[in-house]
Image (cartoon, rainbow, N blue to C red):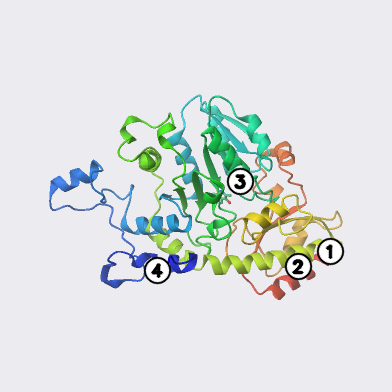
Amino acid sequence: MKKKNFTSTALHSDREGKPEHGVLHKPIHTSVAFAYEDARELAEVFQKKKFGYAYGRQNNPTIEALAQKITKMEQGLATVLFATGMAAIGSTLLALLRRGDHIVSSTYLFGNTNSLFNTFKELGVEVTFVDATDSKNVATAIQQNTRLVFVETVANPVTQVADLVDIGALCAERKLIYFVDNTMTSPWLFSPVTGQASLVINSLTKYIGGHGNALGGSVTDTGLFDWSAFGNIYDNYKKGDPANWGMNQIRAKGLRDFGASLGPEAAHHLSAGSDTLGLRMDKSCHNAMAIAEFCDAHPKVRKVSYPGLKDHPQHERAKKLFKHFGAILSIELDDSLDCFDFLNALDLVVSSSNLGDNRTLGIPVAHTIFFEMGPERRASMGVADSMVRFSVGIEDTEDLLADFEQALSI
Ligand SMILES: *Cc1c(COP(=O)(O)O)cnc(C)c1O
């Protein structure tokens, strides 16, 4: 049969194989342990000679169903799920890196990832932050002990778009793991595998879940990286096809040993939410474009950062790579308008820190999510004191524009 498109595939993925009782949604399995009539079979599962479930921290049928759905969305080989996006990033990197290794990371990073990388430095992993909007900066930073390159597709809050394709080519040439955080674009807007990503992380909490009612994270192996050429795989995980070695180690050293497992109830929420990813994203991106254009023309707004605007430094790149320009934008207000007063004046738009919710959320970034890193690091990321970031939701466009209009005219 002809291969189905994105949303059709996602909607029907739980019915593959022999669904229990013909269910349309994979049931929420809460059992922590799994019984085997034949003890030898249990041993085979432990020894990975046979697929099966052993203990809830490592896997469970509800979790596995969502993992397979994400694998399809990312057109990958396999996916491991975690309790949060941060757990996915932290556990995966700790599973793959060793003391004395070096990583090159985009300097435009989610605040907590930035904080995590600073912890890595204390543990003996070198980190070089570069402006990843140009692959040349990444090339210059590569050292003999470099193991991987980490970038976000679109950075938060200034919306810089990484030089995704050229960095992918560079990593392929230098045999480095190319780790792409696809959270801001989601697999609906961009497929990192087309930019030769090795591992793709998604915070499922954001667009994939979409309803702000469950936390989760995923890491997907695209199948492009040659794990047999990677020096950090322990002998225990060099079993079978080398294509699986990376995931063998991430599952054991990352998920099993750190134990930040996704709960089955959360997996159900995330899976149900993911059915409508494409529909929600289309509407959110449409609204974001309308708000960006409105603010761009408004005298009380000094600057708008949104890849959909023609004067955005990576507008052409975003246009070429992404289905739409995303649903995150940030504005810098004119001095005559205080960012807190403006946010308080908004009626429909909620002051909140999350992103990827169905509701439009706004936050004064320098005073909140980017507060801890201090003024110097903020300046290096282009975060101004008056900046407000919006995660645009699926409300009716005219209602959102009316809300911005009244709040900007206080
Ligand atoms: C939110 C976010 C994360 C972390 O995800 P959580 O599920 O909140 O832990 C990582 N990267 C990006 C780009 C994010 O926006």
- Distance between the Cα atoms at labels 4 and 2? 39 Å
- Distance between the Cα atoms at labels 4 and 3? 31 Å
Going from the N terminus, do you reach mark 3 or mark 2 first? 3
Dots 1, 2 in contact, CB < 8 A: yes
Label 4's element?
helix
Count neighbours of disc 2 (C-alpha within 10 A) and say few if under 14, some if 14 to 19, many if 20 or more.
many
Measuring from the top left, give residue 271's x and y in whole percent: 43, 63
Q: Mark 3 points at which residue?
A: 165
Kind of residue indicated by mark 2: Phe
Count neighbours of disc 4 (C-alpha within 10 A) and say few if under 14, some if 14 to 19, many if 20 or more.
some
> Residue at the spot x=71%, y=56% of the render?
307
Going from the N terminus, do you reach mark 4 or mark 3 first? 4
> Residue at the spot x=48%, y=67% of the render?
7
Q: Mark 4 points at which residue?
A: 12
* Quadrant in which residue 230 is drawn: top left
Going from the N terminus, do you reach mark 4 or mark 2 first? 4
Count neighbours of disc 1 (C-alpha within 10 A) and say few if under 14, some if 14 to 19, many if 20 or more.
some
Measuring from the top left, give residue 302's x and y in whole percent: 83, 55
Label 1's element?
loop
Label 3's element?
helix
Kind of residue indicated by mark 1: His
Kind of residue indicated by mark 3: Val
Q: Is residue 111 above or below residue 61?
A: above
Going from the N terminus, do you reach mark 1 or mark 2 first? 1
